[in-house]
Amino acid sequence: MDRLKVATVWLGGCSGCHMSFLDLDEFLLELADKIDLVYSPVVDTKEYPENVDVCLVEGAVCNEDNLELLRRIRARTQVLVAFGDCAVTANVPAIRNQLGLRNDESVLQRAYVEGAQSNPGVPRHPGIVPPLLPRVLPVHEAVHVDYFLPGCPPPADRIKAVLTQVLAGAEPRLEGPQLKFG
């Protein structure tokens, strides 16, 4: 069997899903024999590669940089998994959506002006604060998602169940206690 090219991505979220991924402990050693981790916050790769077999995407789509990266990921990835409740439902990052239809400027105003202790002002230089989307999106509202891996964060045994099925060439199925949000 050829080694699968696997990627993990962290968009708008807390990185708890990646922490849970690291909780796979000894299974990570088994994975290392079967996959090439080609892109992840835990490896030093700057550009998302071509021909990725499986990508776990953590976090909600909050800004234009997230959206651009996610579209590149979808175009270059065979199987995309929404990884955790923020990716599946937009979860906590989507609390911003309650501020109204066009809340991007009000969020920046609150964070950088009203909440500032010194030097109030929204940073406007390119590359400092990516332009926010009008509303936070779950991954499936931006691109096609093949599988959903819920949990906040998904426990390591749930991640292992999905990865084991994918490595075996099977369609991932979560049933019973494995299919749970929160």
Image (cartoon, grey):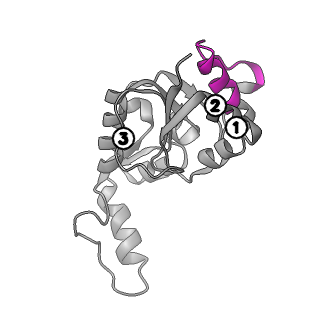
Amino acid type assigned to the residue bearing label 3 in the image: Tyr
Q: Nearer the viewer, residue 24 or 127?
A: 24
> Mark 3 — residue?
48
Mark 1: few/some/many CA within 10 Å (<14, 14-19, 20+): few
Q: Is residue 161 magenta?
A: yes
Say whether disc 3 or disc 1 marks the residue closer to the N-terminus: 1
Left/right placement of residue 17 relative to residue 96 reads right
Q: Specify the label residue 33 is tagged with.
A: 2
Q: Residues within 10 Å of mark 3 (few under 14, many from 20)?
A: some
x, y percentage for residue 128? 30, 66
At label 2, which amino acid type do we have?
Answer: Asp
Secondary element under disc 3, as helix, strand or loop, is: loop
CA distance for labels 1 and 2: 7 Å
x and y percentages locating residue 37 in the rendered image: 52, 38
The span picked out in magenta is 159-177
Callout 1 touching callout 2 (CB < 8 Å) = yes
Eyeballing the image, is 62 above or below 157?
A: below
Whole-percent x and y of residue 23?
72, 44
Mark 1 residue element: helix
Measuring 76% from the left and 20% from the top, which residue is drawn there? 176
Placement of 51 over or under 175, stated as above or below: below
Q: Earlier in the sequence, mark 2 or mark 3?
A: 2
* Rendering coords of residue 156 (x, y %): 72, 37
* Residue 180 visible in the displayed image: no
Instruction: Identify the residue at horizontal 74%, vertical 32% (top origin).
Output: 157
Q: Residue at label 1?
A: 29
